[in-house]
Amino acid sequence: MGFLLVLKANPVKIPVFRNGVLLVSRAGKIRKIVKKLTSKYSTTNPRVLADCLGIFVVGTSFEGRISGALITDKGKRLIGINSNLPYPIQQAVLAHELGHAVLHPEYDYHFLTDYTHFCAGKLEAEANIFAKELLIGSEFKIDEHCDPGGSHYLFCIAEIKAKHEC
């Protein structure tokens, strides 16, 4: 299966927090989308959900700092997950990339780098919120210092999921 990597997204960096207030206005809508998907397919498992949505998932050893990527070509979607990451982090990255597939289908390519603590913009924050809702739900709160726009947010989700076995 060959995939053409085309970056259509505008990499503009916008803040997702201002004075401690989350600027991602779609959080409630994202929660409803996740609830609808998990009800329809009777699962919160990101790998099973990817299968249900017709998204091929592959583990690979990415070089550098890439944790995962969503690639779309001619209507076919592939998510690559860095197989060198611990399993709970792989699940969080997969849920994040699923968030892009569901919330941002108009873009052909998304990738997530690890250890980025900068504000990566609204699309990344929305994908992280999708991952949070899918893996741990809204009853668990993430540390307020953990920015939803950064990939560290996924580490917070994975840690909570592991502790509470959501």
Image (cartoon, rainbow, N blue to C red):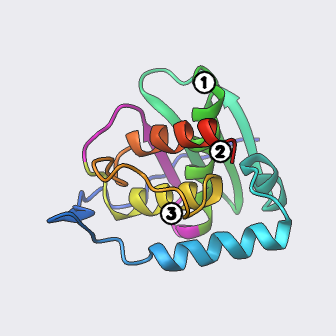
Work out whether 12 lies above or below 25.
above
Work out whether 133 lies above or below 106.
above
Write the residue at 62% across / 33% down.
88
Q: Dot 1: within a 10 Å radius of its alpha carbon, few (fewer than 14), some, or many (20 or more) residues?
A: few
Three-letter amino acid code at disc 3? Tyr
Three-letter amino acid code at disc 1? Pro
Q: Position of residue 64 (x, y in %)?
A: 42, 22
Q: Is residue 81 visible?
A: no
Work out whether 134 lies above or below 90.
below
Write the residue at 81% across / 59% down.
43
Distance (Cα) linking label 3 and label 1: 28 Å
Which circle marks residue 107 in the picture? Answer: 3
Left or right: 121 as drawn, with respect to 100: left
Q: Outermost residue toward the left?
A: 19
Q: In the picture, residue 165 is in which quadrant?
A: top right
18 falls in the magenta region: no
Label 1, on which residue?
A: 86
In magenta, the rendered stretch is 103-118
Work out whether 139 lies above or below 136.
below
Q: In the picture, residue 9 is in which quadrant?
A: bottom left
